Amino acid sequence: MEKYVIIVAGGKGLRMGNALPKQFIPIGGKPLLMHTIDVFYQYDKNIHIILVLPIGQQAYWKELCKEYAFQRPYLLANGGDTRFHSVQNGLSLIDGQENGIVGVHDGVRPFVSIETIKQCYDTAERLDAVVPVTDINETIRYVSSTSQSHTVNRDEYKLVQTPQVFNLQLLKQAYQQEYIETFTDDASVVEAMGKTIHLVTGNRENIKITTPFDLTIAETLLKQDV
């Protein structure tokens, strides 16, 4: 069965306080996004990688690839107005008649483990819709619109990661729906069709790098060779 991954990288670097989009910030000797692509290539050298970037960032990315002699094979899709539309654009590069498994991954999550990726793809072959999650260690409080709050049972909640992995035709069908603001990730899009989302255990290092603090953690993880 053919395997695909759509890597969505549309960040502008605003929360990083940096004019350079966060996916291009160098860590461990090369841009962050290259680390992310590399881990999927390490998982399966035959996986079809589709990179989604805003049009205005594509020329710079190609220059970076030359500078770092980055030669991993991939297809390039244009970023959309929202993450939903970016994933739509990525899916459009996969032949409509193809069968397979497709993951969607955040370009700024370079520390997803190969074990997590494998578990997501293997489970999706059987169950069609899979999301990696981790437990919450902190106490959680619910805050209402009137600013009233109370503690909730953290065991009833999970932190959601990527890659979120699906049967290809299922995800294509899901992304034919009209966009609504509650579509915050791919699971929410598939769930809107009434499909069950199955959970697997992710890895805690699989952080989404969006702030300077996250970048500090990333440098530490690289030194530990995670």
Image: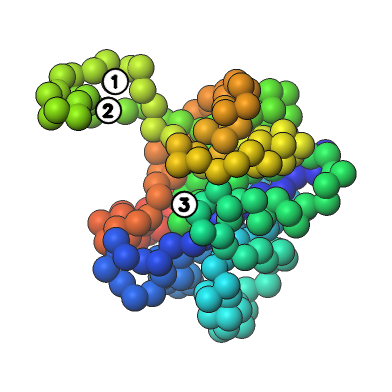
For residue 117, which numbered disc appears in the image? none
For the point 40% across and 58% down, the residue is: 222
Q: Which residue is mark 1?
A: 154
User: Would you name the residue on which mark 2 appears?
Assistant: 137
Marks 1 and 2 in Cβ contact (< 8 Å): yes
Q: Nearer the viewer, mark 1 or mark 2?
A: 1
Residue at x-position 29% and y-position 61%:
15
Asked if residue 34 can be seen in this view, the reply is no
Q: Amino acid at mark 1?
A: Arg
Could you say which is closer to the camera, residue 225 or residue 128? Answer: 128
Give the image quarter of residue 69: bottom right
Question: Label 3, on which residue?
Answer: 109
Question: In the image, residue 100 lies at what x, y percent?
Answer: 79, 39
Secondary structure at badge 3 equals loop
Measure the alpha-carbon separation of dots 1 and 2.
8 Å
Residue beneath the point at 57% across and 72% down: 55
Indicate whether 73 appears above or below 176. below
In the shown orientation, is residue 132 left or right of residue 174?
A: left
State yes or no: discs 3 and 2 in contact (Cβ < 8 Å).
Answer: no
Identify residue type, mark 3: Arg
Q: Secondary structure at mark 1?
A: helix
- Amino acid type of the residue that numbered disc 2 sits on in the rendered structure: Asn
